[in-house]
Image (cartoon, helix red, strand yellow):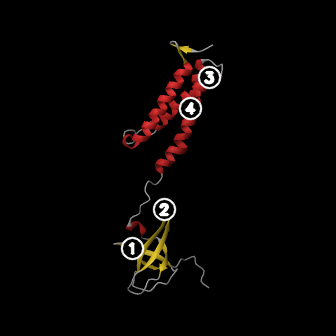
Amino acid sequence: MKKVLYDTDLGVIYLVVLISAGCLTLIYLLFSEMLDGVFEGIPLIDPAVILSFITLTAASGYLFEKFSNLSSISVFIISCGISAIISTFIYFFILVPIRSAEVSLAYTEESLGGQTGKVIVPIPENGYGEIVIETVNGVISKRATGFNNEFIDYEEQVLIIEAKEGTVYVKKYESPYQIKL
């Protein structure tokens, strides 16, 4: 026996809602940057979560209507429960970590100060060499000169004192934890 609402099969209603919510989700993905500021102050009102809730409710409702003999109210309540659990996991385990992640791989010259690097081209007295700095964003290669115009040999560990105009000023780095032989 088909379950109907206003002469329409409930499976068809769930399917139409599923397709509509899927299309709205795709549209939201395209224009989400413009809409992010609108919902920023309200933590749990997130269009991505709301659309995923509607999509999951419609999908599970369609499957339960199609393949089970449960009543329509039971199908709707079970579908909403399943959708609420999955949407909660999506929000707390995917969306919140993504939003709190670093959004830029760029660095500034000011951020290089205090970092350590390794000399790949020896730095002569009163001259320039090259160092590499390993960061979480990758390896950065920079022109370098001695902070006190001293010679620094190949593969020496250096500490960046300051960076300006594309050049880093470095000193030999001696870790307090290094064992000297």
Q: Earlier in the sequence, mark 2 or mark 1?
A: 2
Task: Please state which of residues 67 and 80 is positioned toward the viewer in this rendering.
Answer: 67
The answer to whether one can see residue 176 in this image is: yes
Residue with the mark numbered 4: 83
Secondary element at image label 3? helix
Q: How many marks?
A: 4
Up the image or down, 100 lies above or below 174; here it is: above
Q: Is residue 115 left or right of residue 109?
A: right
Q: Is residue 111 left or right of residue 5?
A: left
Residue with the mark numbered 2: 137
Please report the residue visible at 58 percent of the width from the left and 15 percent of the height from the top.
Answer: 3
Q: Residue furthest left?
A: 165
Between label 1 and label 3, give the one nearer the viewer.
3
Q: Earlier in the sequence, mark 1 or mark 3?
A: 3
Residue with the mark numbered 3: 66
Between label 2 and label 1, give the one nearer the viewer.
2
Q: Position of residue 52 (x, y in %)?
A: 51, 35
CA distance separating discs 3 and 4: 18 Å
Residue type at mark 1: give it: Glu
Q: Position of residue 68 (x, y in %)?
A: 65, 22
Q: Position of residue 124 (x, y in %)?
A: 43, 86
CA distance separating discs 1 and 3: 68 Å
Residue 125: image quadrant is bottom left
